[in-house]
Amino acid sequence: MTYPEILKICAALYLVTILIDWLRTREFKRFLLELLLLLGLIVLDIFLASSSAGYVTFGLDDSSFMVALLMFPAILLGVAARYFFYLRGKFSWIDFTKPFCISPIMLFPLIGSLQGIQRFEPMQLLSFALLAFQNGFFWQIILQRARPKQ
């Protein structure tokens, strides 16, 4: 499975999640805002992955891809840990699953640090997995501080 496919699946899951949340809460403004943000990400993906760019967006070699497959579950564990760590009150499946849908976005900064490495040592794999867990745990801060490169 490629990164664009993973992003499409997560975008679809997020759309389903915000639809369920809207039907549950009837907060149309919140739904519309989340939908507009999702559409903005889809448009950004179309521009980044266009064939006119002449390259495959977020392409990795085989060894880096395997490390990314190790980091993705670590990010998911970090997101789940954050939810339970800051849980106050009643558990909500909708609030629990929303961050999972955007978790591939948290993987992209880590992918940049993988490029150019031909062979990974066990300590590097562990370090990348721990860093991925940390990105998942602090997902809100990471996405709030994300800025385009100038």
Image: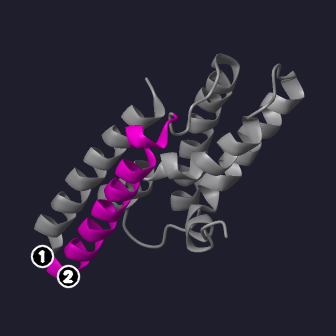
- The picture quadrant where one finds residue 7 is top left
Which residue of the protein is positioned furthest toward the bottom in this rendering?
29
Disc 2 designates what residue?
29
Amino acid type of disc 2? Lys
Q: Are marks 1 and 2 in contact (CB under 8 Å)?
A: no
Residue 109: x and y in percent read: 65, 51
Query: Does 41 appear above or below 76?
Result: below
- Residue shown at 64% from the left, 36% from the top: 71
Q: Residues within 10 Å of mark 2 (few under 14, many from 20)?
A: few
Quadrant location of the C terminus?
bottom right
Residue 121: x and y in percent read: 87, 22
- The picture quadrant where one finds residue 116 is top right
Query: Does 80 appear above or below 33?
Result: above
Tell me: 58 left or right of 19. right
Image depth: mark 1 or mark 2 in front: 2
Disc 1 designates what residue?
26
Q: Of residues 83 and 18, which is closer to you in this image? A: 18
Residue 5: x and y in percent read: 37, 33
Amino acid type of disc 1? Arg
- The kind of secondary structure element at disc 1 is loop
Query: Which SS type dominates the magenta stretch?
Result: helix
- Residue shown at 35% from the left, 49% from the top: 46
Q: Is 115 included in the stretch rendered in magenta?
A: no
- The picture quadrant where one finds residue 4 is top left
Q: Which residues are magenta?
A: 26-55
- Residue shown at 65% from the left, 54% from the top: 135
